Amino acid sequence: MKSLASLAQRNFDVLIIGSGLAGLTAALLLARGRRVAVLTKRELSDGASGWAQGGMAAVLAEGDTLEQHVNDTLIAGAGLCDLAATRSVIEGAPKAIAWLRTLGVAFSEDRAHPGELHLTREGGHSQRRIAHAADATGAVVQRTLIEQVRSSPNITVFECHMLVDLITDRQLRRAGNQCHGAHVLDVNSGAVATFSAAHTIVATGGAGKVYLYSTNPDTATGDGIAAAWRAGCRVSNMEFIQFHPTCLYHPYAKSFLISEAVRGEGGRLLLPDGTRFMPVHDARAELAPRDVVARAIDFEMKKHGLDCVYLDISHQSPAFLHEHFPNILQRCLELGIDITTQPIPVVPAAHYTCGGVLTDLAGRTDVANLYAIGETACTGLHGANRLASNSLVECVVLARATFEAIEATKTSEPSLAMALPAWDESRVTDADEAVVISHNWDELRRFMWNYVGIVRTTKRLERAAHRIALLRSEIQEFYAHFRVSRDLLELRNLVQVADLIVRSAQGRHESRGLHFSRDYPQTNAVALPTVLVPAAPDPSPPT
């Protein structure tokens, strides 16, 4: 791990903020001919990619077609998927998986056909097309990429370093619309340093921690989305927060996900008395898309006053469960639940941010030389509801497209790094009441869960907007007077993302995909994305 012993400006060809699958893929590709810095606010392995259990969707089996995969994605996306983005990612998916295999990623193979991948099926998919590594695909992929990144001589990794803000012409109060790098907090020392780069890629993941209950790691605080918004980038479709239907319900099971593949392999959702309820809600039953299943569980829990429902896969043999779901089986056993004989208690939880920074199909944002990829970005692939296992593939496909876009800018002569302003701490002091941060964080996550969750109303959104305005005022005052810390920066970003979610939800006067409003239960005939545009910067010169 590198530490910023000196506050001298650090210069790189490419600055990548985030160490999930998207960021590490981009780093490996770009490091072939450029000096790359990878920043991650904890350790390389602490992002959401490593938590992904299910797998990567791609047309790999005989009888499956690209058109079927595209159609399944469009159906799940409730009419809001961008067709060009959908085709681009799905056509690139087989190549993405093949590339990962060349790096040594050990996907599960079919016992009956050695050398061929074992493909499973998940909700919303009409075919078996999910390549996976048992039930820990993300962790296996991440371990492989991390080994490659650490051994690359052209990649410098900065762990425990967090984005404070992007440095753009907008921030510098000068003509132009380019990104030049970022100010970065060394979490261990508390120092803020300046990173300069010809190209900056934001790949910080989603914002699941804006909600009280989430399957996401603690790092998922919307840092890249909030920073890009402040830098002048548009955001799109932020109202579409996917709630995974089946998060393990147990006081000691922090954010543990029960994979979609459990339902794909025949798992049934039950009430406490053993009654199966999904066929009443949708003809596809447990294989319906996530938004449908999550709302059905939410409905049954509220109707019957339940703390959870149950997911039963015990009809499968113990040998099958040991082979396909070893990590789920082991974790449940640790908590006293034997999934070979007992149903699993589950509840919905915030899982994936379908919207994000608006980009083209090469990761370009509204700011020149600034790119966004992975869950941070909104390409239009996921529409109003992400189809299971499309996201990891999107990370690889878009990272490659961004690499190709940056490569196309290559010139014969290296450009000189611009001298950027150092971080100014001359008018701040150490925080005297850190309890303000923890109190505001808790309040934010609770009212977002209660007012901006699976089912919404106009009144609930108004209440959330009012509370967000009060919190933003308090946090901005705190930010202006005290030195930054990881907790303060994360809270600042979460409040900004919460504001974007609520504003987007207030502007959608219909129910579509993951956004369900009791006041607007109909679905409009025409599907339109939600696009928010940041205010223009103050034209006055800096004082």
Image: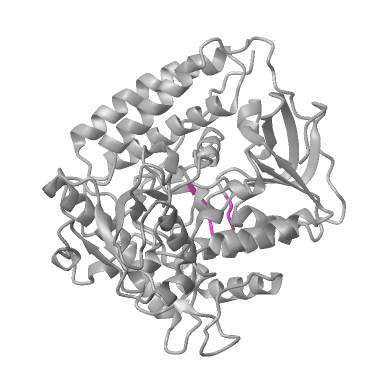
Q: In the rendered image, which quarter is residue 5 located in?
A: top right
- Which color scheme is applied? one colour
**Residue 406 visible in rendering:** no
Give the magenta part as a residue range. 357-364
Examine the structure image and report whether residue 362 is included in the region drawn in magenta: yes
Examine the structure image and report whether residue 34 is included in the region drawn in magenta: no
> Is 443 left or right of 197, judged from the image as shown?
left
- Circle count: 0
* Furthest residue toward right: 413
Q: Residue at x 58, y 54 (%)?
A: 363
Q: In the rendered image, which quarter is residue 443 located in?
A: top left
Asked if 465 appears above or below 372 in the picture, the reply is above
Q: Where residue 332 sits: x, y (%)?
A: 41, 56
Foreground of the two, 448 or 406: 448
Q: Where residue 360 sits: x, y (%)?
A: 53, 56
Q: Where residue 44 sits: x, y (%)?
A: 66, 48
| Prevailing SS of the magenta stretch | loop
Q: Where residue 298 sits: x, y (%)?
A: 22, 50
Foreground of the two, 531 or 140: 140
Q: Residue at x 18, y 71 (%)?
A: 283
Asked if 222 appears above or below 69 in the picture, the reply is above
> Is 114 left or right of 274, judged from the image as shown?
right
Q: In the rendered image, which quarter is residue 157 located in?
A: top right
Q: Residue at x 37, y 67 (%)?
A: 262
> Is 484 left or right of 28, judged from the image as shown?
left
Quadrant in which the N terminus appears? top right
Quadrant in which the C terminus appears? top right
**Residue 280 visible in rendering:** yes
